[in-house]
Amino acid sequence: MDRKWWTLIAVCVATFMLLIDITIVNVALPDIQESLDASLSSLQWVVDAYALTLASFLLVFGSIGDRLGRRRVFSIGFGIFITASALCGFAGDPTLLNLARGVQGIGAAAMFATALALIAQEFEGRERANAIGIWGATVGGAVAIGPLVGGLLTEGLGWEWIFFVNVPIGLAALVLTEMRIPNLRATDPEPIDVPGLITFSGALFALIFGLIRGNSEGWGSTVIVACLAGAALLMAAFVLIERHSDKAMLDLALFGNRSFAGVSNVAFCISAGMFAMFLYLTLYIQDVLGYSPLQAGLRFLPLSLVSFVVAPLSARLSAKVPFRALMGTGLFLVAIGLVLVGGISAGDSWTHLLPGFVLAGIGIGMTNPGIASVAVGVVEPARAGMASGINGTFRQAGIATGVAGLGAIFQHRVASDLGEQMPHAPSSFADAVSSGAADQALAQLDPGIREQAAAAANHAFIAGLNEILLVGAAIAFVGGLASWLMVRNSDMIPPAGVPAEAQPEGAEPEGAEPVVTA
């Protein structure tokens, strides 16, 4: 088998592992909550600690990969990811689990930042388009199929195994990477931007912390105001640093390209509007409808299968249909799907979710390949590492802020609804309902009010979920508008030696020869 196909296999395995770890935990969250006695904020951090560090380090690892060699950074990231996965499985309390998840995200960032660059350096022309289509299908499938895999492992072996399973698979893929893929670096690599990394990571952490703790601390409290103001100041400092630095990890000039700015918005919106929703949908399916982890995972299977089928078809269509049409229509379908999922009433079965899941699955499959293609297709090949890092950063920042922001709205609505129905219930009861621990909380109440409290808890949870589904739909719709209005195929860089007017509608640019290093 040619080297390029081994590269594609290794990259797809790594991408599947690092992305499935975003959604695989969702089905296990109720078990984690019960096992570790975790609050809603702790459960949010199980998802966000990973997405936060992944987003924070993607840009810098793109630059490091161009300097030190993409395979080398890819392999180092794999090693960190495998080690942290084992630590997650052995964690005995929420704090240790979330710290290990943060380290796991750092390893994932090194893998994800170099993934598209590894594909771009091995494939050219139409083969590259096909390879990116396969990679795009892997992205969509990993995010969608995570709940099913999580359900199988959680119910069969325990929640710890959603992390332990990464170890043997990761070691095998790591050996393949070292044996079959040469270490390649860019001919004109970007330097490492330490001030940019510090300010960007600090801004993102302060924002997520403020959103997650806002309800419990009080939105006007000193801590929350300081966090949100600090996030704004740090982000402003980051922009100033990047604008005046000769070694910026994020070249702001790229956003002068309307298509690059548009696809960055698309990546953020599909993550914040759709993928962040998996946490709350999973809590509903398991804690309100009463399904086991495996049964919950099976309920997500229609979405998973549809996105698997549509993604490669979308990649092939991109040769004839403008990217803006594929991604824009896809996000509009996601928005409509989320609206259809909403409108839940007490007593509804899981089949109420089915039409929306199918439509959202089609939208995910249509959108993901185009995001990858446009992100690396509108920049010169030497900057593929930075472009893919920025693209991935917007994806993961979308998940992190989506989980935190939607969670703030959800938790506030649940507490407000319960306050109206049960004004004398302890505040801890609302926290328990929000985190999926209603059954444990109900067991501690007076038997005479348990039935009333159970009905109130379900009503409040459903009201909160319906509200954030509408918010998620609005976010997806904004992403669809960004695609239609901003992304242009004319911004794609044509293959070397081929005039732009002779380039097929969705063709990918060819890369310059990289340098082989030890």
Image (tube, rainbow, N blue to C red):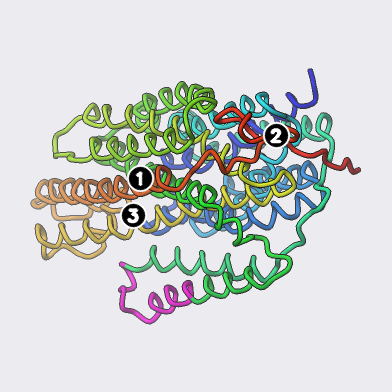
The residue that mark 3 highlights is 406
* CA distance for labels 3 and 2: 42 Å
Indicate the amino acid at tag 3.
Leu
Q: Are marks 3 and 1 in contact (CB under 8 Å)?
A: no
The secondary element bearing badge 1 is classed as: helix
* CA distance for labels 3 and 1: 13 Å
The residue that mark 2 highlights is 495
Foreground tag (3 vs 1): 1
Are there few (<14), some (14-19), or many (20+) residues within 10 Å of tag 3? many
- Which label is found at residue 466? none
The residue that mark 1 highlights is 476
Foreground tag (2 vs 1): 2
- Picture quadrant where residue 75 is located: top right
Residue 317: x %, y % from top left: 49, 24
Assess whether residue 257 is covered by the magenta stretch.
no
Q: Which residues are magenta?
A: 215-232
- Picture quadrant where residue 64 is located: bottom right
Residue 484: x %, y % from top left: 40, 42
In primary-sequence order, the first of circles 3 and 2 is 3
Q: Are marks 3 and 2 in contact (CB under 8 Å)?
A: no
Indicate the amino acid at tag 1.
Ala
Please state the total of marks drawn on the protein image.
3
In this rendering, position of residue 320 left or right of residue 78:
left
In this rendering, position of residue 434 left or right of residue 365:
left
Residue at 61 percent of width and 44 percent of height:
378
The secondary element bearing badge 3 is classed as: helix
Residue at 73 percent of width and 24 percent of height:
5
In primary-sequence order, the first of circles 3 and 1 is 3
Figure check: 312 above or below 481: above
Are there few (<14), some (14-19), or many (20+) residues within 10 Å of tag 1? many
